[in-house]
Amino acid sequence: MLLLAACSNDFKLNEQVSTLTVTPAVTDAGIVALGTASLLPISLYAQDGDVAVISVDVLNVQGDWFSLVDTSFPTVANGETATLTVSYLPEEEGLDWARVTITTDEALTPSHEVAVRGEGAVPTVRLYPSLLDFGPVQSGTSATLDVTVINEGRVALDLSDVAFDNDRFSVDDALPIHVIVGAEATVGITYTADDESEQTGAATLDLGAAIDPVTLRANACSTASGDLYDSDGDGFSFCAGDCDDWDGGVNPAVVETCDSVDQDCDGVVDDGTSCVDDDGDGFSEDGGDCNDGDDAVSPAASEVDNNGVDDDCDGTTDSGSADDDSDGYSASAGDCDDGDPDVFPGAPEAADGVDNDCDGLIDEGTAVYDDDGDGYSEARGDCDDTDSGAAPGLTEIADYTDNDCDGTVDEGTVNYDDDGDGFTEVGGDCNDANAAINPGEPETSGNHVDDDCDGVTS
């Protein structure tokens, strides 16, 4: 019989040993704007048993901007994954890296190392324009203009918010807006007019970078461009008494017509027309008033004998006394031509070389008469015959009026954008003859020119 004997040391049970897999070995935050945190996750996977993390040490080798987000260390259950997060928050420019050491209760490899790195950079951004002038905006309406965000740096930007110091201004686009390196994006700014008073403000764009706010203004006659503020191009700006700068047929030089509109901007609707009771006696010309400039004459008045006037507008003067042309006035009542029914006191003056209203002046108030005494009638090119400061050949001045009647308001003055760059001298343009110089331009180093009109040359 063959006897077999075995030593107990010849047989060992294969015991499973728990292990932790840590990934990645190297993680890179890339280029990060100064003052902005980037989170770097480190994955911990346990197999063949639970693994307890005993400690995590972050050693900043270059720079001092890496730190552990959560200092409560996990026990990673078998077959599960846990995450450690390292924050990179650079405060200075340059390349940075750190060594992350993870110590566990593993029997075989209780220590793991991960390298984390990143680069801090200053975000560089430019806004254009630096000033938004909405011009005249009617009460109850709104207008929108764009600000362009130009990313000139090495860090992607997020426009997360726009703050305003005047609640009549608001953002028209959904935020955030992402702007990659070397690209540009626009954000709409809207002005809503509750009235037509002058409004100013500032918009501060949160881009994670220090940048000056955008200046805002609307209905701003104190700093307006004459061209911008004459929206309808009728030679009268919003700032110079045009009560409807969106209608070229409404301005202080227009003759009032019967249309329920204050066309001449004097605050009275249809005054001087046949449908309005100009003398306040309760009757207009359309209502039978034969002299709407005299409140003692109307269809409701009583006839007064021997005064040469048709007081009650019945077509008969003084119960039948002499009114040869039947216009309601006899010669004794001031009719300067009792043979012409279109000539009598209070008659509308026409451009016909006749003193129609018997006031001693011929054709006053018509297109052929120089009403303001500047040497030009409307027929000879006077664009405002109520203002002696507006006539062909006059010098343009900064008063929001077309002084020289050439169809352009304030050209050549501080109120006008002469170089077409969107800025007037009043609006901050320090060289209104050069479109490349204005508050919205970037400063060019070394050219000895104040490109952005901030008072400093480089």
Image (cartoon, helix red, strand yellow):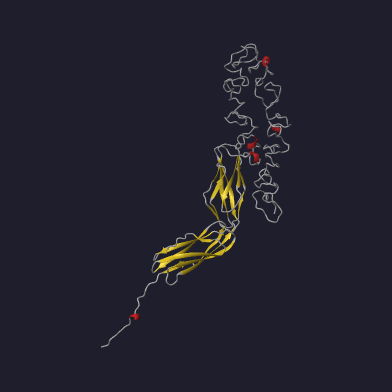
> Observer-nearest residue: 247 or 136?
136
Quarter where residue 337 is shown: top right
Q: Residue furthest bottom?
A: 1
Residue drawn at the location 54% of the way across and 49% of the way down: 161
Residue drawn at the location 64% of the way across and 15% of the way down: 309
- Measured as percent of width and height from the top left, residue 450 is found at 69, 51
- Asked if 406 appears above or below 322 in the picture, the reply is below
The N terminus, quarter of image: bottom left
- Measured as percent of width and height from the top left, residue 379 is found at 69, 32
Left or right? Give the position of 411 relative to 278. Answer: right
Left or right? Give the position of 345 relative to 57. Answer: right
- Asked if 372 appears above or below 52 in the picture, the reply is above
Q: How many marks?
A: 0
Quarter where residue 388 is shown: top right
Residue drawn at the location 42% of the way across and 65% of the way down: 52
Left or right? Give the position of 304 relative to 28. Answer: right
Residue 384 appears in the figure: yes
Residue drawn at the location 40% of the way across and 68% of the way down: 47
- Measured as percent of width and height from the top left, residue 334 is found at 68, 17
> Observer-nearest residue: 113 or 233?
113
Residue 23 appears in the figure: no
The C terminus, quarter of image: bottom right
> Observer-nearest residue: 374 or 147?
147
- Measured as percent of width and height from the top left, residue 338 is found at 67, 17
Quarter where residue 152 is shown: bottom right
